[in-house]
Image (spheres, rainbow, N blue to C red):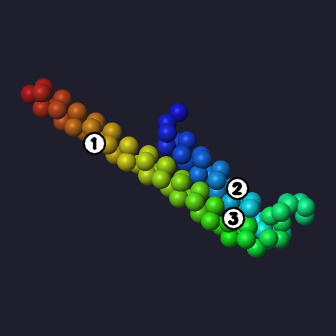
Amino acid sequence: MKIWITIVILGVIISIFGIIFHLQGQSVLGPESSFMYANPDWITYGIQIATLGIIISGVGISINNSVLKTFKRKFDDLAVFKSNSGK
């Protein structure tokens, strides 16, 4: 498996956890016996965790884009080399 896919999936999972924590802090989701339930601190923590997950996913996507550009550049160089050597 390519590393960028792993990073993107990890970022999405972290974002989902952040959203769940945020909703628990707002008393929307989860059991009332949870220490996160109706706790304003977890509203903020959830937003921060979800933001971190989005940033991690963005890093994974940017890694993919930079790798694709590098391979495309190398392929284009190889194609130019082959076309010049055939003359």
Badge number at residue 73: 1
Instruction: Pick whichever, 18 or 45, lies toward us.
Output: 45
Please identify the quarter of the rendering in which residue 16 is found.
bottom right
- Measure the alpha-carbon separation of dots 1 and 2: 38 Å
Instruction: Pick whichever, 66 or 14, lies toward us.
Output: 14
- Mark 3–mark 2 contact, CB under 8 Å? no
Q: Which residue is mark 2?
A: 17
Quadrant housing the C terminus: top left
Seen as rendered, the residue at the extreme left is 87
Nearest to the eye among marks 1 and 2: give it: 2
Position of 72 with respect to 44 (left or right) is left
Secondary element at tag 1: helix
Label 3 packing within 10 angstroms: few (<14), some (14-19), many (20+): many
Amino acid type, label 2: Phe
Secondary element at tag 3: helix
Amino acid type, label 3: Gly
- Measure the alpha-carbon separation of dots 3 and 1: 41 Å
Residue drawn at x 59%, y 56% as measured from the top left: 53
- Give the image location of residue 47, x and y in percent: 65, 67
- Give the image location of residue 60, x and y in percent: 49, 49
